[in-house]
Amino acid sequence: MRSSMRVLAREHLALRALARIIALEAELLGRDGRADLVLLQDIATYIGEFPNRIHHPKEDDFLFRHMRARDPARCGAIIDRLQTEHLKEDESIANFLAALQAVSAGEPGAAAGLAQVAASYAKHLLGHIEAENTLVFPLAEEVLQEDDWAEIDAAFAANDDPLVGAQPGARFSDLHRRIMAMGAMPPGL
Ligand SMILES: [Fe+2]
Ligand SMILES: [Fe+2]
């Protein structure tokens, strides 16, 4: 597996695990109005600061850019869809954080609001990752050439994600433990 694809695969596994946690917490919230708010806050903060600042922009600037340049006819439509989703990410996380804040402030109806925001965010995130994994990555293998890959691999080698990087950061250590305990990250990937 190309080194950039390995980084992307690891980051997608972590994001998928986080989406599963968000969906589960949304279900608990919907059922009895309670959830692990600290965990949800950690997840929303992490996604806002790392995947949304590093992961998705690097897909845009390196992988998607080269794919579109090599074969716009085959790559254009799916990349348009995913880039539109990338553009909405900041707003989605801001909504998520606002819904969390409303629950912390004890606003009426806030738990049901958060349950709905969290469930729809988890579904959106899983769909986004699924489309990249099953549609874009196989297409990338077909259309990209060696010099494209050299640039893409170098760009992703610099990623230092606190959940999946070589040195998991202390700041998100609880989140890291949680996704490792879920068996979300196979050793050696
Ligand atoms: Fe993406
Ligand atoms: Fe991605």
Image (cartoon, grey):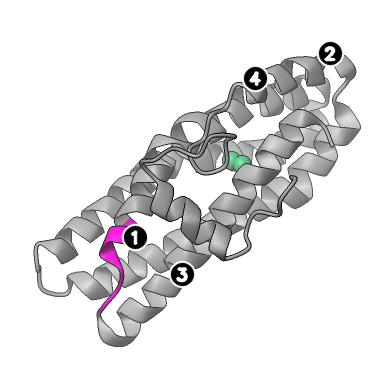
Residue shown at the point (44%, 59%) measured from the top left: 121
In magenta segment, residue 35: yes
Horizontal and vertical percent position of residue 67: 76, 26
Q: How many marks?
A: 4
Neighbours of disc 3 within 10 Å: few (<14), some (14-19), many (20+): many
Residue at the disc numbered 2: 147
Horizontal and vertical percent position of residue 102: 16, 61
Q: Which residues are magenta?
A: 34-40
Residue 109, quarter of the rendered image: bottom left
| Circle on res. 39 | 1
Q: Nearer the viewer, mark 1 or mark 2?
A: 1
Which type of secondary structure does the marked residue at label 1 adopt? helix
Residue that lies at the very extreme toward the bottom in this rendered image: 31
- Mark 1 or mark 4, earlier in chain: 1
* Callout 1: CB less than 8 Å from ligand 2: no
| Circle on res. 23 | 3
Residue shown at the point (43%, 54%) measured from the top left: 175
Instruction: Name which residue type carries label 3.
Output: Ala
- Mark 4 or mark 2, earlier in chain: 2
In front here: 184 or 50? 184
Residue at the disc numbered 4: 155
Residue shown at the point (42%, 68%) measured from the top left: 119
Q: Disc 3 versus disc 4: distance between alpha carbons? A: 32 Å
Instruction: Name which residue type carries label 4.
Output: Ala
